[in-house]
Image: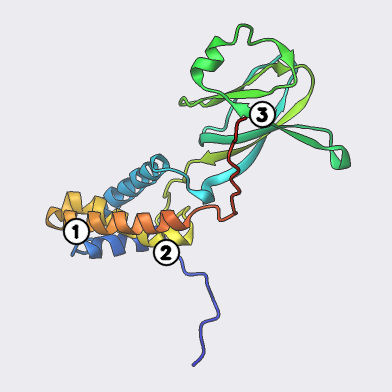
Amino acid sequence: MATSGTTAFDLSIDDLIEEAFERCGMRMTAGYQMASARRSLNLLFLDWANRGLNLWTIEQDTISLVAGTATYNLDSDTVNVLSAVIRTGTGASQQDVRIDRIGRAEYLALPNKNTQGRPSQFYVERANTPTVSVYPAADTSYTLVFYKIRRIQDAGAYTNTSDVNFRFLPCLVSGLAYHLSMKYAPDRTPALKQIYEEDFQRAAVEDRDTAGSHLVPAIGY
């Protein structure tokens, strides 16, 4: 027998909502239920941002540093910054130098935050408008290259597909069903919550960097 030859299965937002309602043992009968489900879906996306790394939301970004300026605004969809380097030169002469992330207390304790030089540290202020501060402040033009976690995009129109990797579609449906059950089918909430947590755990275990690690013990003499 022939196979489909395709690997593009996805679900639109309205299909996700319909499947979730069916798991609650009901069918949508009003436009308000659609709006309620979309609101729950957006809240579910925010919950995932608090559960840890979602690899498909990790992106590389850059900021052109200006001499004497220490603090820069990040894009509003930035959840966190994972790592950063200072880049100099271009082409064959390009060089990337890793810089270390420091915490709020360490950055506050720096005696002169306007000292200029090649930045060796950075601090991320995770506010509503996130910022990144480098230390020392740049003494010339550099490029800050960093990996950030961005927010999962909102559900938007019902005809959209979700901003979710295909591996997470099963737990997206089960998570939405769990959230909807709290409003429409509370008798099913315990069972749907268990299914959701199992589906999420399975997807989260697979959603990881599979590069090997080499550990060397530190031996003092």
Residue 13: quarter of image: bottom left
| Mark 3 or 2, closer to the camera | 3
Task: Name the N-terminal-most of marks 3 and 2.
Answer: 2
| Mark 3 or 1, closer to the camera | 3
Q: Residue 144 carries which label?
A: none
Tell whether label 1 touches label 3 (CB within 8 Å).
Answer: no
Q: Which amino acid does label 3 sit on?
A: Ile
Direction from residue 34 to residue 83 in the image, left or right? right
Element class at badge 3: strand
Q: Which amino acid does label 1 sit on?
A: Ala
Q: Which of 23 and 203 is in front in this view?
A: 203
Q: Which amino acid does label 2 sit on?
A: Leu
Q: Which of 152 and 39 is in front in this view?
A: 152
Quarter the C terminus occupies: top right
Task: Give the residue at mark 1.
Answer: 191
Disc 3 to disc 2, C-alpha distance: 41 Å
Q: Position of residue 148 (x, y in %)?
A: 57, 38
Task: Name the N-terminal-most of marks 1 and 2.
Answer: 2
Element class at badge 1: helix
Q: Write the residue at 56% across / 33% down.
A: 75
Residue 101 vertical placement versus 194 (above, below):
above
Q: Write the residue at 73% across / 13% down.
A: 116
| Mark 1 or 2, closer to the camera | 1
Residue 12: quarter of image: bottom left
Task: Give the residue at mark 3.
Answer: 99
Q: Where is residue 71 in the image (x, y as percent from the top left)?
A: 62, 19
Q: Residue 11 carries which label?
A: 2
Disc 3 to disc 1, C-alpha distance: 47 Å
Task: Name the N-terminal-most of marks 3 and 1.
Answer: 3
Q: Where is residue 162 in the image (x, y as percent from the top left)?
A: 45, 55
